[in-house]
Image (cartoon, coloured by chain):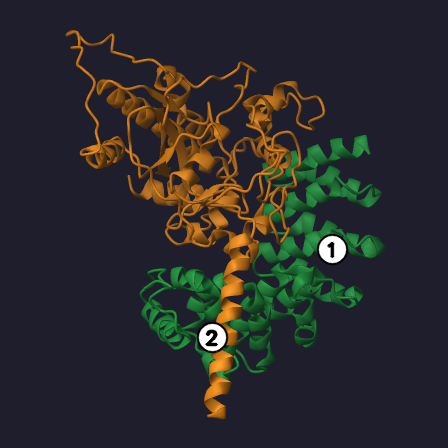
Amino acid sequence: MKILIKITYRLIKDLIKMTAEKKKQKQKLTVTPEFTLNDDFEPFSEYDSIFGRVKWDKSMKAYKIFMYDKVAEILDKNQVGYTQIDHAMAIASWTVHDYFRNAFSWEKMGSPANIMPGTELKKYDVNKDNIDRITKTIKAVTKSFGADMVGIAEYNPNWVYTEDRAETAIYMPEGITAVIAIGTIMDSDTISTSPSMTQGFASGMGYSQMAFIVSSLAEFIRGLGYTAIPTGNDTALSIPIAVEAGLGQVGRNGLLTTKEHGARVRLCKVFTDIPLLFDEKVDFGLTDYCQRCKRCAEACENEAISFDNEPSFKTYSKSNNKGIYRWAVNVDKCYEFWVDNGGECSTCIAVCPFNARSGKVFTDPADYWKKRLAEQ
Amino acid sequence: MNTNETNSPAKIEEELFRLIQNEIGNVKFLTETFVHENSYESGKIIFNKVQNELFVQNLLIFPVLFNQVFPHIDNEFYIPTLIEILKHKKIDPRIRLQVTRLLGWKGSEAKEAIPHLVDYFKGESEVNLFTAIALAEMGYEKSNELIPTMLIALKKGKLYTTRINAARILIRDKNNLKNILPNLIDALENDQDFRVRQKIARYFGEINDPSAKKALTKAYKSDSHPVVRTVAHTSLDDLKKL
């Protein structure tokens, strides 16, 4: 009898402890999927982003020093990964994004190339009986246009920029209810050549793909009679939107990290008023993982990533939006390396164990080119 | 299976080990989800299990533990579990190395692991190098003793990240910097990986030392890699502002 009481007592004690632990965990500040915001939080101005500040912020070390300013002195015939070929390819990969400006038009485009005029159709009826189907259709169509991941979140004005890089105020139209978050996976072989110029090709491709996908998706939604605002990095913060749409969580490196491909994902989004069902946020334990892993901080080319064990509200410059609990990245340092490197860097993406699940961590640019040329 | 269906500790243990076994050779990343959802109980089970040396020595299971279990067990058990593993004197060096690395990343929070690491930092093996780095991160009070191994890590570390870590730790040792500097200069001039050289070039922009400046000038003029040259140039500009 005594033994039985003892066992029961121990079991109850364990149960109480477990319940208390769970309660404690629930009260913990979270980085994602729920954002923890404090009183300092206010929507971010893109004018304060690193690409905005480089033009006006004299306190910046890299004030008026642009990403490609040192390219001429960096290009080197003998250093594979830093040749004119690599640079030209990286720049060219941005072409659709940079020159197809209508891709991000807030208005229906039509097409001057069409000989036949389109027909005005009435608004497609979305109701409680077909909302599930139309939501799935939107996702299927987005993937047909080339997206690898699609999630839908309720419109949250917290993430819309107050101003663009030129300090022009941004006003989202009345009636926007949802945002479709889109991810395209960047090529693993190319990203793994980071920090070489070669890897810039994967980023640029991601941007050009996003121009194609968001413009096509926006026209599709407009074709159903609804508003669609296609955006790349402009208009709103893509990362928190992607989190709220269930694509992933935010890691130590400040990037949207997916369970299958890590941060090797390029993001874009379309705001809309078409009624849609929202996705659940995901929590695959990334915050715990990042608290115990510092690979990206160790590998970062300019120590721009925090080594702190715990996330915090700490920021480094105006380019970190205040009042958000996370590991803020010292983006000034990150950018300074980009300048010295003659282009973007993806080292923190490549070394992340979540990228390693489906991609390579490092490829020598010489091997990359050897393989690519052998395929021809 | 979610928490509600497996609320008894015995069932959680049964399910946890079923999942771990299933991950061997057929990685599906299902274990991590289960551990994340049952972090306290899983932590308790694993903490007890690692007392058994045979369990720890199982090289088939260890990658699953390392990638999917340890990152998600409750804080209460995390460092104690890693320390328990180190208590087994004959564990495979690969396991010791990984566990040491995890503890090093926790820095001063893992201070209680120091007594289990101090016997392993002298030497040239990767385990020795990782141990010295981990001890430095934890704030080992006899940090001077770590310098010889750290210098070996800087020169002979197999992974470029080992050499970068050594450089990062050595450069912040202001008391011994004068003695350490020739080794960092040697690494700036001779490390085969430009990422190590560019990082040291960046560090040298933060210290006002004539020999470092001379090395930076040399790197700017003649390093074989263009990025090392541009970073050295930037650092020389930084030094002008000091």
Answer whether labels 2 and 1 touch (C-beta < 8 Å). no
Question: Which chain letter goes with mark 1?
Answer: B
Mark 2 or mark 1: whose residue is earlier in sequence: 2
Which quarter of the rendered picture does the C terminus of chain A lie within? top left
As drawn, B158 above or below A65: below
Mark 1 element type: helix
As drawn, A193 above or below A218: below
Q: Nearer the viewer, residue A219 or B154?
A: A219
Q: Nearer the viewer, residue A61 or A88?
A: A61
Q: Position of residue B145 (x, y in %)?
A: 78, 68
Crowding at dot 1, Cα within 10 Å, few <14 / some 14-19 / many 20+, comes out as many
Q: Position of residue B123 (x, y in %)?
A: 67, 72
Instruction: Identify which residue is drawn at 39% across, 69% down.
Output: B7
Mark 2 element type: helix
Residue located beneath label 1 in the image: B170
Q: Please state the total of marks drawn on the protein image.
A: 2
Does any portion of residue A257 appear in the rendered image? yes
Q: Nearer the viewer, residue A82 or A209?
A: A209
> In the rendered picture, chain B carries what hue?
green
Question: Which chain letter goes with mark 2?
Answer: B
Residue located beneath label 2 in the image: B45
